[in-house]
Image (cartoon, grey):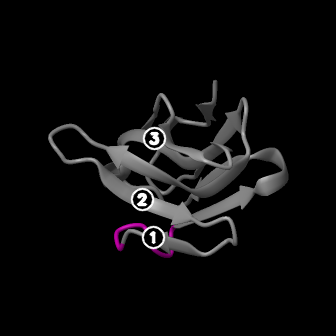
Amino acid sequence: QVQLVESGGGLVQPGGSLRLSCSASGSIFRIGRMGWYRHAPGKERELVATVSSGAWSNYAESVKGRFTISRDNAKNTVYLQMDSLNPEDTAVYFCYAYIATNIATTQDLWGQGTQVTVSS
């Protein structure tokens, strides 16, 4: 069984920073794209940032220049460094990974979510 485990959420003041981590564990053959999505109350789930296995990344316009996504392929881990946070960034953040468990079997995998609250 493969799972994603997230950490790093919490409460931060406007202008502050947080770093989210997400590690994949289990029977993994290969990991493709990894990323972060968020879901705020009353809003649709939205993409925050994704990164390919070759480190090509893309970002939502709302976080460009403030958030940085990176990954450590040796550790099967993806990170999201969030700087200059504002209250509009408050949401549950979900980790995502496209994982192959063998040469013929792939799955879209989601983490359990971690709460990020930006408030004074």
Type of the residue with mark 3 = Phe
Q: Which mark is residue 94?
A: 3
Q: Nearer the viewer, residue 26 or 39?
A: 26
Tag 1 and tag 2, C-beta contact below 8 Å: yes
Q: Nearer the viewer, residue 101 or 116?
A: 101
User: Residue at point 42% right, 59% down?
Assistant: 48
State which tag comes first along the sequence, 1 or 2. 2
Residue lying farthest to the front in this orientation: 104
Residue lying farthest to the left in this orientation: 42
Q: Residues within 10 Å of mark 2 (few under 14, many from 20)?
A: many
**Residue 29 visible:** yes
- Alpha carbons under labels 1 and 2: distance apart: 6 Å
Element at label 1: strand
Element at label 2: strand
Q: Nearer the viewer, residue 13 or 115?
A: 115
Type of the residue with mark 1 = Tyr
Q: Which residue is mark 1?
A: 59
- The main secondary structure of the magenta stretch is loop
User: Residue at point 85% right, 51% down?
Assistant: 74
Q: Quadrant of residue 8?
A: top right
